[in-house]
């Protein structure tokens, strides 16, 4: 659809060859007082209000918004061999969560993000036996039950890295020590 085909000309022969007078309308919708457009100039759509340009899909069906991709901060960042292979060499990780009310622990497969074994003091079988759900005997019970469930799933090794706010002492150490005592080899990484 060219500039000539837009409204305001009335279909008169030769109306597109010579610019319309001020009273007839212009190529951009018939506003009076606008300057006459020359066909050699390329019309460009105005930029959108927020500074993001709108384009049309390949099949010209609907407009979409084009956004620039973010550049990575460090283009020369080297990923070490250990970082690339650790998920396959040590696929299972231990996660321990201790709150004021309960203790829970799980062993997760790193690559598939599936939980292989889970134990916690909120479960019915442990809750009925324990006197308190957040003391050291409860942590030892969670470790023992998690070790049994991990052996059922054929998991005998796991790695544990404490969270930044957690110290490897007290209740967390009791859960890990209980797992080690019940036959699960835990590699603890302290940074």
Image (cartoon, rainbow, N blue to C red):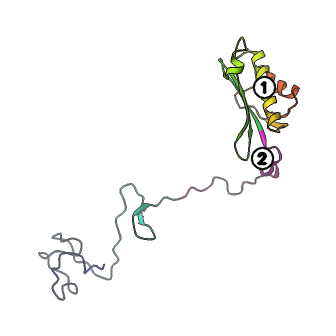
Name the spot of residue 118 as percent of width and height, x first: 72, 31
The quadrant where residue 48 appears: bottom left
Does residue 156 lie above or below 55 as drawn? above
Viewer can see residue 166: yes
Q: Residues within 10 Å of mark 1 (few under 14, many from 20)?
A: some
* Left or right: 83 as drawn, with respect to 23: right
Is residue 83 one of those drawn in magenta? yes
In the image, 136 versus 37, the foreground residue is: 136
Q: Nearer the viewer, mark 1 or mark 2?
A: 1
Q: Residue lying furthest left in this view?
A: 23
Q: Residues within 10 Å of mark 2 (few under 14, many from 20)?
A: some
Gap in angstroms between the C-alphas marked 1 and 2: 25 Å
Q: Which residues are magenta?
A: 69-92
The kind of secondary structure element at disc 1 is helix
Which residue appears at 21% of the width and 70% of the height?
29
Q: Which residue is mark 1?
A: 145
Q: Residue lying furthest top in this view?
A: 131
Name the spot of residue 178 as percent of width and height, x first: 83, 24
* Disc assigned to residue 52: none
Q: Which residue is mark 2?
A: 87
Which residue appears at 75% of the width and 54% of the height?
78
Name the spot of residue 32 as percent of width and height, x first: 15, 70
* Left or right: 185 as drawn, with respect to 98: right
The quadrant where residue 5 appears: bottom left
Dot 1 or dot 2, earlier in sequence: 2
Which residue appears at 86% of the width and 28% of the height?
180
Does residue 142 lie above or below 41 as drawn? above
């Amino acid at each position: 659809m060219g500039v000539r085909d837009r409204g305001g000309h009335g279909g008169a022969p030769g109306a597109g060859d010579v610019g319309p007078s001020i009273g007839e309308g212009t190529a951009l919708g018939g506003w009076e007082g606008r300057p006459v457009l020359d066909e050699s100039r390329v019309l460009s759509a105005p930029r959108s209000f927020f500074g993001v340009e709108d384009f049309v899909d390949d099949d010209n069906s609907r407009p979409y918004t084009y956004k620039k991709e973010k550049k990575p901060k460090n283009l020369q960042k080297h990923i070490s061999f250990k970082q690339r292979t650790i998920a396959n060499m040590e696929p299972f990780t231990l996660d321990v969560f201790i709150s004021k009310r309960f203790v829970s622990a799980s062993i997760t497969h790193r690559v598939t993000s599936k939980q292989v074994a889970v134990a916690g003091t909120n479960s019915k079988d442990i809750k009925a036996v324990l006197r308190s759900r957040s003391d050291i005997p409860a942590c030892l019970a969670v470790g023992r039950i998690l070790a049994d469930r991990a052996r059922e799933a054929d998991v005998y090794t796991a790695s544990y890295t404490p969270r930044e706010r957690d110290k490897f002492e007290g209740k967390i150490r009791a859960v890990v020590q209980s797992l080690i005592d019940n036959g699960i080899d835990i590699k603890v990484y302290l940074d």
